[in-house]
Amino acid sequence: MVTKDSSAKYDRYVIASDEMSASVITLSAAVTDILFKGKHCALGFDTPEQYDDNPGYVGLIVGRYANRIGGSKFTLDGKEYLLTPNEGPNQLHGGPDSWVKRVWDAEILSDNAVRFSLCAPDGENGFPGNMTASVTYTVTGSTLRLDFEGETDAPTVFAPTTHMYFNPAGGSILNCSMQINASGWLQVDEGLIPTGELMPCKGEFDFSSLRPIARDYDHCFVLASEDACTAECGDVRIRLRTDFPAMQFYTGTWLSEPFGRNGGFAIEPEFYPDSPNRPAFPSPVLRPGETFRKYAEYIFE
C-alpha cells in the first residue's frame, strides 16, 4: 500500500507491506523512516523541513557521484573537467547544493512502489551531460529495494547511492555487529582519497564473520558477493544485497544532533571513490544510448 501526505513542505510517501514500511520525501528522495515490527530502524528527523540543513546527508540520495573525487577534477575522452569542490580541494557526493538540495518528481508505480526522478543539467557542479536519473523504492515483505537508473546525452560519470543510516537498537552503534563479504578495502590518504592500494581484510578490517563494530570506520570495502553485508543491532538483523562493486561503511563519526557521534551506521553501495581518476577501478562512465542500472536490497529480520 502507498499513501501520500502533502501537508508539509515536501510531499511524503509511505510504502508499506504487512511487515514493514518506508517513508520517503521528495527532497533528495530521502528515506525519513523505516518501521519494522514496531522498531524505527533508520535515522530520520522529526519534520521534513529539517532536511533542508542536513550536513550528515541523513537518508538522502546523493549524486551525481557518491563519495569523493580527488582534486575535484577528472579527464574523460581526453578532456579535463573541473568540478566544484566542497570538501577542501576534493568533491564529495556530487558537490555543493547538488542532488541533496533538489526536489524530485514522484510517481506511484504500483501498490508497493514509488519512483523518484529528476533532470540534471549539463555543467552541474562541473559534470558533463544532461542527465535523467531515478530511484524506485519498492517494499515487499520485509525487504526495501532501491533501483537506480540514469541516462545522459553526453559522456559523463555517474555513481549515485543512498545515505541511509541505521540503528534499530538505539545508543551507540559501536555495540552493533557487522559482517562484510569483501575481498579487500581501499587504502586512503588523509583526505580520504584512495591511494590505489587494495588492502587485505585483516585485523580491525576483518569482517568475515559477525563481530562488534567497536571503532570508527569510513572506508570503502570491495565486495566479493552481491550478498554484501549483514548487521545486527539488538534483535534486528539487516542484510544488504547489491550489484554495486563496493560499499562504504561509515559509523557516523561526524553525525550532529539530534543523532550524535555513532548514532547510526551507513552501508552505502557504491563505485570506488575517485574512480574517474583511476583506470584500474571499475568504470563509472555512462555514455549516450546506455542506461545505468544498479540495485540495493535492505532485508530486515
Image: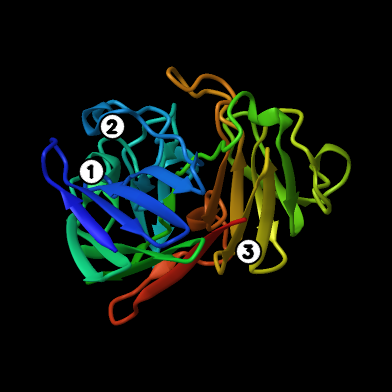
Q: CA distance from mark 2 to mark 1?
A: 8 Å
- Sequence order check, earlier mark of 3 and 1: 1
Residue at point 56% right, 29% down? 252
- Kindly indicate whether the residue at mark 1 contacts the one at mark 2 (C-beta within 8 angstroms): yes
Q: With respect to residue 18, does 207 lie above or below?
A: above
Instruction: Point out residue 180 in the picture as x, y percentages from the top left corner.
Output: 73, 53
Examine the rendering and report whether any part of residue 216 can be seen: no
Quadrant in which the N terminus appears: bottom left
> Percent from the top left, x then y, of residue 291?
34, 77
Q: Which residue is mark 3?
A: 280
The residue drawn where x is 56% and y is 20% is 261
Indicate the quadrant where residue 47 lies: top left
Q: Amino acid at mark 3?
A: Ala
Report if the CB atoms under discs 2 and 3 are less than 8 Å apart: no
Return the residue found at the far right. Answer: 203
What residue type is disc 2 on?
Answer: Tyr
Which dot, 3 or 1, sits closer to the camera? Answer: 1
Kindly indicate whether the residue at mark 1 contacts the one at mark 3 (C-beta within 8 angstroms).
no
Q: Is residue 19 left or right of residue 251?
A: left
- Which is more N-terminal, label 1 or label 2? 1
Report the residue marked by disc 1. 27
